[in-house]
């Protein structure tokens, strides 16, 4: 049985089912409220959800019980008081390597960490106090820290991505950070501006290959990249058959460091699936070539937008399950590593995030 | 003392009481006093800058106010989510 946590513009939906036999909606929580991200910490079974009320600001809630019941507000999700900025949104929550550790990324380019399973949080001072922060440029979705890549077995190593402040790397558990943007080519900037390390590097999503942690994959704002040196430098792998190298979500098969999946959109000026067809593109050779996987997905007059957190996975290898949702409210799933797809849900509110557990 | 009136989730966070008598010379002082008495309200009305969140409206005796609006004993300060959405 697979459980899907689907964050939408109007609440959290919990679905249960199997890729072959279909899914049912079991719970709707936070009715009417935008759920930017929801996940489960498998170590504790705790569910966590990021809620950005338009009225009351961004919060993280958690529950150890039925998600249809009461959720508890986590402490510490705020910027330091008395500054000139306010927390706008929490984009993602990721499991840390150390027991009880979780990370949360948000806007404005902020990383929170929890060491009690998500009940209380504190800001990561090393990243917050980066001297260059005043020059960081936000993307269209704000200055969002949306990707958090831990290193299997080493709690000290972490990579995070901020749109559009690029990749930041730490090897001392977040006390110090350095950039990892070498090789990225922001085609939206004049060539002269590339010398300015503060010029916007609009990273859309990053994933690490767990079996070979030096390898990372990135969907950029125009360009798909691979790093083989833990995010220090990047090589463009977007040329081998993709319908477009623009998009947001990206996923990997945790068993195969040569694998990655992207869901291209036409371009930044037209953020819908190319040619009116919904296709997931797969590489099994580190990005040398990409193969469209659309069996069972809408193939005509389908102009969907899939957001950066709306692509989730469960399992690995031949049992890899993939799920993604669109702002149309449609959710699709595959139980055979993308070879075939079926519709998991329709007519949900716009889908912001999909996590499979 | 002025009276701060809350509805919906704010009321629930503040001990499930709709009205709170508080001391303060301005709206922000009243709201800080409310946070001290009911810490669960912290971050829900005022953000980290001490500003009233963009989509919350505060009315003092029926007139729109802001953080610096003066309040006197007996004033009614209503805190309401704005008419917004999508």
Image (cartoon, coloured by chain):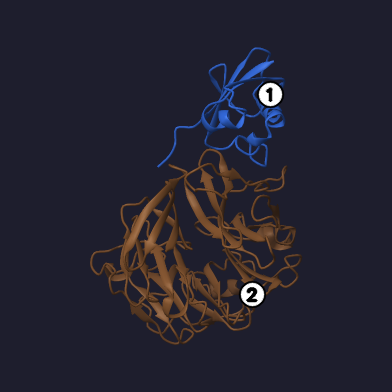
Q: Is residue B59 left or right of residue A354?
A: right
> Camera-side residue: A289 or A180?
A289
Give the vertical position of A11 relative to A189 (above or below). Answer: above
Q: In x, y percent, where is residue B48?
A: 67, 42
Across and down, in percent, residue A185 comes to 53, 76
Quadrant in which the N terminus of chain A appears: bottom left
Callout 1: few (<14), some (14-19), or many (20+) C-alpha neighbours within 10 Å? some
Q: Which residue appears at 59% of the width and 55% of the height?
A: A106
Q: Secondary structure at mark 2?
A: loop
The one nearer the camera, A31 or A105, is: A31
Disc 2 crowd, CA 10 A, few/some/many (<14, 14-19, 20+): some
x and y percent of residue A131 in the render?
74, 61
Residue topped by disc 1: B26
Which disc number belongs to residue B85?
none
Image quadrant where residue B83 sits = top left
Left or right of B69: which side holds A287?
left
Residue on which the image places disc 2: A152
Compared to A334, does A122 lie above or below?
above
Label 1 resides on the chain identified as B
> Pointer 2 indicates a residue of which chain?
A
Nearest-to-viewer mark from 1 and 2: 2
Q: Colour of chain A?
A: brown
Q: Is residue A51 above or below residue B81?
A: below
Distance of mark 1 from mark 2, alpha carbons?
52 Å
Mark 1 secondary-structure assignment: loop
């Amino acid at each position: 049985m697979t459980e899907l946590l689907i964050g939408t513009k109007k609440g959290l939906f919990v679905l249960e089912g199997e890729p072959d036999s279909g899914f049912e909606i079991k719970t709707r929580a936070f009715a009417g409220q935008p759920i930017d991200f929801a996940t489960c910490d498998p170590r504790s079974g705790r569910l966590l959800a990021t809620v950005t009320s338009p009225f009351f600001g961004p919060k993280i809630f958690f529950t150890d019980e039925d998600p249809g019941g009461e959720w508890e507000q986590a402490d510490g999700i705020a910027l330091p008081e008395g500054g000139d900025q306010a927390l706008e949104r929490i984009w993602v929550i990721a499991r840390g390597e150390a027991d009880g550790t979780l990370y949360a990324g948000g806007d404005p380019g902020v990383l929170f960490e929890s060491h009690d399973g998500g009940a209380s949080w504190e800001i990561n001072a090393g990243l917050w106090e980066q001297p260059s922060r005043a020059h960081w440029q936000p993307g269209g979705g704000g200055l969002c820290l949306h990707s958090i890549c831990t290193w299997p077995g080493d709690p000290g190593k972490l990579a995070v991505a901020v749109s559009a402040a690029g990749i930041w790397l730490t090897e001392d558990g977040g006390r110090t950070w350095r950039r990892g943007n070498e090789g990225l080519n922001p085609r939206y900037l004049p060539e002269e501006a590339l010398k300015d390390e503060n010029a916007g590097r609009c990273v859309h999503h990053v994933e690490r290959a767990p079996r070979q942690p030096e390898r990372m994959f990135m969907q950029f704002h125009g360009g798909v990249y691979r790093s083989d040196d833990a995010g220090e430098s990047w090589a463009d792998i977007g040329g081998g058959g993709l319908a477009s190298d623009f998009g947001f979500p990206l996923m990997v098969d945790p068993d195969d460091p040569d694998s990655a999946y992207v869901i291209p959109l036409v371009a930044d000026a037209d953020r819908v699936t190319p040619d009116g067809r919904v296709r997931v593109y797969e590489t099994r050779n580190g990005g040398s070539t990409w193969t469209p996987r659309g069996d069972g997905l809408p193939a005509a007059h389908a102009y969907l937008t899939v957001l950066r957190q709306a692509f989730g996975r469960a399992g690995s290898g031949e049992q890899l399950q993939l799920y993604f949702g669109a702002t149309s409210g449609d959710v699709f799933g595959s139980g055979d590593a993308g070879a075939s797809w079926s519709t998991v849900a329709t007519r949900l509110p716009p889908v912001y995030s999909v996590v499979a557990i | 003392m002025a009276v701060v009136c809350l509805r919906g989730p704010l009321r629930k966070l503040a001990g499930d009481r709709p009205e709170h008598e508080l001391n303060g010379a301005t709206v922000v002082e009243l709201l800080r006093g409310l946070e001290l008495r009911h810490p669960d309200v912290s971050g829900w009305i005022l953000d980290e800058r001490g500003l009233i969140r963009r989509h919350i409206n505060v009315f003092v005796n029926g007139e729109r106010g802001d953080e610096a609006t003066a309040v006197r004993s007996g004033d009614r300060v209503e805190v309401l989510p704005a008419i917004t959405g999508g």
